[in-house]
Image (cartoon, rainbow, N blue to C red):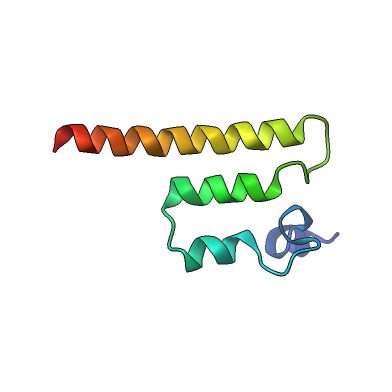
Amino acid sequence: MSEEDLINNPAHYTEGREIEPISVIEDWKLDYHLGQVIKYVSRAGRNKGSNSLARDLNKAIWYLERRIWIEETEDARS
């Protein structure tokens, strides 16, 4: 894979798919944290190396928990 492909069309997001995660994130107008959740769930287990599924799912959980914390913190201020 060329350097350009790694930037514009990374296989761990696009291989075997019709829709790229970035398209979903943009179409749904997700904020940063929820966009990261979609990104990590969509690539979970598709990277090389051991434990990539667990690692990516744990990252998705981290971003989701962070988004929940932000929401709860903002609600507490209201």
Residue 38, position in %: x, y?
A: 57, 50
Residue 74 vs 1, above or below: the answer is above
75 left or right, relative to 2: left
Please give the name of the residue rendered at 82% of the width and 30% of the height, measured from the top-left corner: 50
46 left or right, relative to 40: right
Position of the N terminus by quadrant:
bottom right
Residue 57 vs 36, above or below: the answer is above
Residue 43 vs 4, above or below: the answer is above
Please give the name of the residue rendered at 83% of the width and 34% of the height, measured from the top-left corner: 49
Q: Would you identify the image quadrant in which residue 24 lies?
A: bottom right
35 left or right, relative to 72: right
Residue 6, position in %: x, y?
A: 75, 57
The answer to which of 56 and 2 lies nearer the viewer is 56
Please give the name of the residue rendered at 43% of the width and 63% of the height, measured from the top-left corner: 29
Q: Would you identify the image quadrant in which residue 7 lies?
A: bottom right
Position of the C terminus by quadrant:
top left
72 left or right, relative to 14: left
Residue 47 vs 27, above or below: the answer is above
Residue 46, position in %: x, y?
A: 78, 46
Residue 48, position in %: x, y?
A: 83, 40
